[in-house]
Structure formats: structure tokens, C-alpha cells
Amino acid sequence: MQSKSGTAVVGRQVARGPVAVSRAFAPVLGANGGGALINMLSGLAWFTLPTTGGYASAKAAMWAAINSLRQNLLAQATLVTAVYVGYVDTDMAAWVDAPKMAPDVVVAAALDAVEAGAYEVLVDEFARHVRTGLSGPLTDLYPALATPVGSR
């Protein structure tokens, strides 16, 4: 897990920033009869690795915030769509040697979801796998936990 200060910085950038932007635009959308907000999350909102604790925690907080925000904005006819994906081929993920989605594919999926009135869009297999895994045993997502603590 990141240091306390590193986690705080990530939390401010990843969770609080999009909430603040959403809150700033919500009254404008409401005054104009509603609309849509798209928030970029990650499959890491539902899954974490030993090295992604701070980032994943912030994305999980964002997931909760979006669930609240979309309920609060229903009356003003504003759709809040969350986009979940694994790695996107951007500068942020340049260091990762893993499959990545092209940004234009992510954008197209997000816009299609808004057009369909969807609250969530699971862009890639990673996001779909992790979302499905939430309803199963914890050991399905974290196989290392199948070995009891102290038995390693």
C-alpha cells in the first residue's frame, strides 16, 4: 500500500476531483432540462493488488460517490454513467506490459452507454470479470486467500 501522504494525494485526484466537477456541472445540466455526466473509473474500483491500494481505494470511493450522485440527480433528469475498464493505452499506462484498450474504443463505449441510458459500461473483459466476481466468494478474485493465514 502507498504511504499515507501518497494515498491522500491519489484520493484527492481520483475521487474528490471528479465529484467536484460533477457537482459543478450538475446545476447547469439541471437548469437546462438534464443531461449526462460520464465518470471514468476502473476495474480497480472492485479489485486491488498489493501495489494499487491507494488508487483502488480512491476508485472504490468514486464508485460509492457515483452511486449516490446518480440518485441525487434523478429528479433533474441527469444520467450519471460510470465507465469501467482495465488498462487504456495512454501515457498513464505506458509502463504496463499488458493488453490495453484503445482510447477511441473506450470513448465510443461510453457514448453508446449514455445513448442507451446505461448507468454503467464495462468496456473490457477485465472489468466484466471483476464485476461478475463481486457476487462470488472472495477467493475467486483473490486465489491466494484460499490458503489459510499461517499455512503458507
Image (spheres, helix red, strand yellow):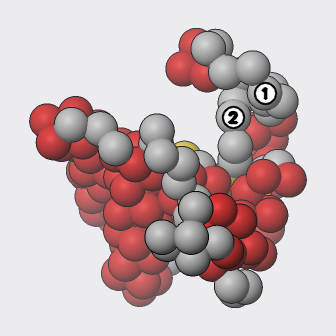
Residue visible at 72% across and 85% down in the picture: 136
Residue visible at 34% across and 44% down in the picture: 1
Quadrant the C terminus occupies: bottom right
Q: Position of residue 53 (x, y in %)?
A: 40, 48
Disc 2 to disc 1, how far (Cα)? 8 Å
Direction from residue 129 to residue 118 in the image, left or right: left
The residue closer to the viewer here, 3 or 149, is: 149
Q: Are marks 2 and 1 in contact (CB under 8 Å)?
A: yes
The residue closer to the viewer here, 53 or 108, is: 53
Of tags 2 and 1, the one toward the viewer is 1
Direction from residue 86 to residue 129 in the image, left or right: right
Instruction: Give the vertical position of 13 relative to 19 (above or below).
Output: above
- Could one spot residue 14 in this view of the protein? yes
Residue visible at 67% across and 74% down in the picture: 146
Instruction: Report which residue position mark 1 lands on.
Output: 98
Judge the density around disc 1: few (<14), some (14-19), many (≥20) Cα neighbours within 10 Å. few
* Three-letter code, disc 2: Tyr
The image quarter in which residue 28 lies: bottom left
The image quarter in which residue 13 lies: top left
Q: Position of residue 83 (x, y in %)?
A: 63, 53
Judge the density around disc 2: few (<14), some (14-19), many (≥20) Cα neighbours within 10 Å. many
Instruction: Give the vertical position of 13 relative to 50 (above or below).
Output: above
Instruction: Report which residue position mark 2 lands on.
Output: 87
Q: Secondary structure at mark 2?
A: loop
The residue closer to the viewer here, 32 or 138, is: 138
* Three-letter code, disc 1: Ala
Q: Position of residue 92 (x, y in %)?
A: 54, 20
Q: Secondary structure at mark 1?
A: loop
Direction from residue 137 to residue 36 in the image, left or right: left
| Earlier residue among tags 2 and 1 | 2
